[in-house]
Amino acid sequence: MPTPRDPEARRTRAREEFVDAAFRVIDTHGPAPSMNDIAHEAGATKPRLYRQFADKADLYSAVAQRMADEVYELAVSDFNFLLDAPVSALRHALTGYADVVSRHPNVFRFLAQSRSASEDPTVAPPLDIGRDIATRFSSVAETILKSVDADTAGIDYACRAAVGAVLASTDLWLDDPSLDAADFVDQLTDLVWGLLDAFLRRKKIDLDGDEPIFMTLARLKG
């Protein structure tokens, strides 16, 4: 087990401290952080920062991974989707997502800018927060479908489309101060359920959005 004296443990801790600092800088000053500001916030020098991260893209990827982990922790981790109805489960997941974004709106904007400027070699690579969340979402959905021997072909496309709609809609929410988090979640729940329901119907799976998933699965197996 790693100890605080292990080089790898020290490196991991140092990287985490810089990511913490990046979040604070972006939260406070907006989605255009400088490496100098991040290093200063961490109580370090820029050369020390670059000893922990190969370049800006490496740090940006770590920020995106932290954001995705926070979303997953609140939206999916330790939640039993089988005991809930699909629409209610979606609302739970999207509420967790909205909570993270509302705490770090500038971090979301920062990551969105990074995605839209992929021609710049200093920004985050295409493997960003959206792809990470979609991959985890696909894994949950695929497990549920396989439990009733359903065809899972295309589920990754459906989940990517759903997550893409969520990310695109988040820009509208952040730019519209009249739309509170609850309204945003209501809008997204209807939108994402419509996308997933269309995919399931194409697979000849009629899933009642208000019926607990385990009951639907039992009926399909029977």
Image (spheres, helix red, strand yellow):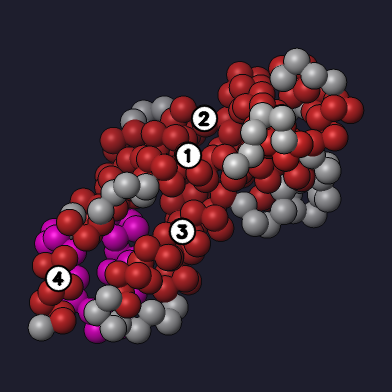
Distance of mark 3 from mark 2, alpha carbons?
21 Å
Residue at figure coordinates x 75%, y 15% from the top left: 43
Return the mark for residue 104. 2
- Give the magenta range: 190-213
Amino acid type at image mark 2: His
In the foreground, 107 or 7:
7
Q: Position of residue 156 (x, y in %)?
A: 47, 71
Residue behind mark 1:
70
Distance of mark 3 from mark 1, alpha carbons?
13 Å
Distance of mark 2 from mark 1, alpha carbons?
11 Å
Mark closest to the chain's N terminus, 1 or 4: 1
Viewport quadrant of the C terminus: bottom left
Q: Which dot, 4 or 2, sits closer to the camera?
A: 4
Distance of mark 4 from mark 2, alpha carbons?
37 Å
Mark closest to the chain's N terminus, 4 or 2: 2
Q: Which dot, 2 or 1, sits closer to the camera?
A: 1
Q: Dot 2, crowdedness within 10 Å: few (<14), some or many (≥20)?
A: some
The quadrant holding residue 31 is top right
The quadrant holding residue 145 is bottom left
Q: Dot 3, crowdedness within 10 Å: few (<14), some or many (≥20)?
A: some
Distance of mark 1 from mark 4, alpha carbons?
30 Å
In the foreground, 180 or 24:
24
